[in-house]
Image (cartoon, rainbow, N blue to C red):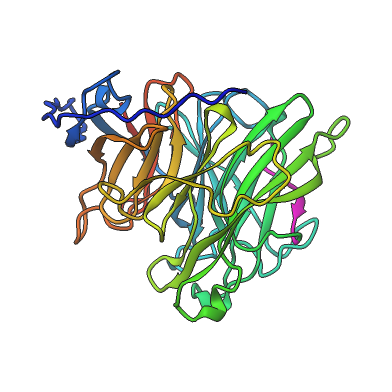
């Protein structure tokens, strides 16, 4: 496949006027760079709360966000699945619930996972992370980075949990490089699915809060089984490594987070500690480790990027853990638009944003807000 040359353009900053819908808040724009096509998020000016993400057991700290693209079992097309990382005592790495939220705000528990009743190993227990994907046939894969008391000192390697369309855990994927699965994206072709998973616990706890450059990205190949059999792992390949990671009392662990598969087979990675976006080429087919990949964009409006999604125009959307901004970046690395999604706290928006997903109709963006324990929509 011929790769297009990446030509940077000079850009002129311009103010963007936004309006506020009744019952919603303005998504304040910091700036846009209007040379070339209009940025995707420049067309979206309102943030609305869809629903609370807190289920009956009181789990908080929503992390993973995944849009459901087909009806299957208890899953409803167009709804959003959200995974919770904390329990009702706000202990990190102890959340066990997945909540399904419809576009009109109807929320219900999809699954509550019992760490003592799993069909396979998940070292350390259950603490559901940002790693969340819904596969064809209604199979749900969610990452677990568990603790016993909410601190990094007790963190276990965890696993990937495979649930069926009714919310029952049918399989666990552990070991073979899975060590603190933190985020995930996936792509499926016929009976084959490629999971791309970032891992943040390789030597991290032993580092005692110091930076350790051992974060990895795995490509895990699954094959759909016959009938009602869950998909099985047939291969695991390290396609990225050397990402910075460290323990953190507020965030438990900081390491490579958001993943998104873009055009020409590039896997974009939100390198949170590096405050940058990198790209791993030929991610679906490569059989070698690309290290941290090619740097796409660094600093400027990026401020500890966490969740990542690919916009309908092919640009890269990231949400900042440092200041509550969403940033749109071209594949060339130009940061062309930003919006303030959360302004709570001091500094404003810090630590509020994690999971991010483009909606089914590709005209808005869903995101979770940890400051309010809600699913929200930028539209």
Q: Is residue 73 visible?
A: no
User: Would you identify the image quadrant in which residue 201 lies?
Assistant: bottom right
**For residue 173: magenta?**
yes
Q: Residue at x 27, y 28 (%)?
A: 9
- 123 above or below 301? below
Observer-nearest of 222 and 303: 303
Which stretch did the figure color magenta? Answer: 165-175
**Relative to 287, 67 lies left or right:** left
**Relative to 167, 325 lies left or right:** left
User: Farthest residue in the right direction?
Assistant: 226
Q: Quadrant of the N terminus?
A: top right
- Percent across and percent down for residue 6 are 41, 29
User: Would you identify the image quadrant in which residue 204 lies?
Assistant: bottom right
Q: Residue at x 69, y 38 (%)?
A: 194
Q: Quadrant of the C terminus?
A: top left
Observer-nearest of 306 and 163: 306
- Percent across and percent down for residue 65 are 49, 41
**Relative to 248, 182 lies left or right:** right
- 30 above or below 236? above
- 130 above or below 273? above
- Percent across and percent down for residue 259 are 52, 43
Q: Residue at x 77, y 40 (%)?
A: 222
Observer-nearest of 121 and 329: 329
Q: Is residue 30 visible?
A: yes
- Percent across and percent down for residue 134 are 62, 35
**Relative to 188, 150 lies left or right:** left
Give the mark count: 0
Q: Residue at x 69, y 29 (%)?
A: 188
- 92 above or below 235? below
């Amino acid at each position: 496949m011929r790769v297009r040359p990446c030509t940077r353009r000079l850009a002129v900053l311009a103010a963007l006027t936004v309006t506020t819908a009744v019952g919603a808040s303005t998504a304040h724009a910091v700036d846009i760079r209007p040379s070339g096509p209009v940025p995707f998020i420049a067309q979206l000016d309102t943030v609305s709360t869809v629903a609370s993400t807190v289920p009956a057991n009181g789990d908080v700290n929503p992390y993973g966000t995944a849009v459901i693209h087909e009806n299957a079992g208890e899953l409803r097309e167009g709804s959003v699945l959200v995974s919770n990382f904390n329990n009702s005592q706000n202990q990190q790495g102890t959340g066990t619930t997945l909540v399904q939220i419809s576009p009109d705000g109807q929320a219900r528990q999809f699954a509550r996972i019992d760490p003592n009743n799993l069909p396979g190993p998940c070292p350390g227990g259950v603490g559901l992370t940002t790693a969340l994907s819904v596969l064809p046939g209604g199979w749900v894969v969610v990452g677990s980075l568990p603790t016993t008391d909410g601190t990094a000192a007790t963190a276990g390697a965890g696993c990937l949990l495979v649930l069926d369309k009714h919310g029952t855990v049918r399989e666990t994927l552990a070991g073979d490089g899975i060590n603190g699965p933190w985020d995930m994206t996936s792509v499926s072709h016929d009976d084959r699915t490629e999971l791309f998973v970032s891992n943040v616990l390789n030597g991290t706890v032993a580092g005692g809060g110091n930076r350790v450059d051992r974060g990895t990205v795995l490509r895990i190949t699954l094959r759909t089984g016959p009938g009602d059999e869950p998909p099985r792992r047939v291969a695991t390949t390290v396609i990225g490594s050397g990402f910075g990671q460290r323990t953190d009392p507020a965030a438990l662990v900081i390491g490579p987070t958001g993943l998104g598969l873009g055009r020409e087979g590039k896997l974009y990675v939100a390198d949170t500690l590096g405050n940058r976006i990198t790209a791993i080429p030929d991610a679906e087919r490569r059989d070698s480790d690309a290290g941290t990949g090619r740097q796409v964009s660094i600093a400027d409006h990026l401020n500890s990027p966490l969740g990542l999604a690919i916009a309908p125009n092919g640009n890269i959307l990231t949400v900042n853990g440092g200041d509550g901004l969403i940033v749109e970046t071209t594949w060339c690395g130009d940061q062309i638009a930003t919006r303030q999604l959360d302004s709570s706290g001091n500094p404003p928006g810090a630590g509020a944003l994690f999971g991010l997903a483009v909606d089914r109709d590709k005209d808005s963006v869903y995101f979770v807000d940890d400051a309010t324990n809600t699913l929200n929509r930028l539209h």
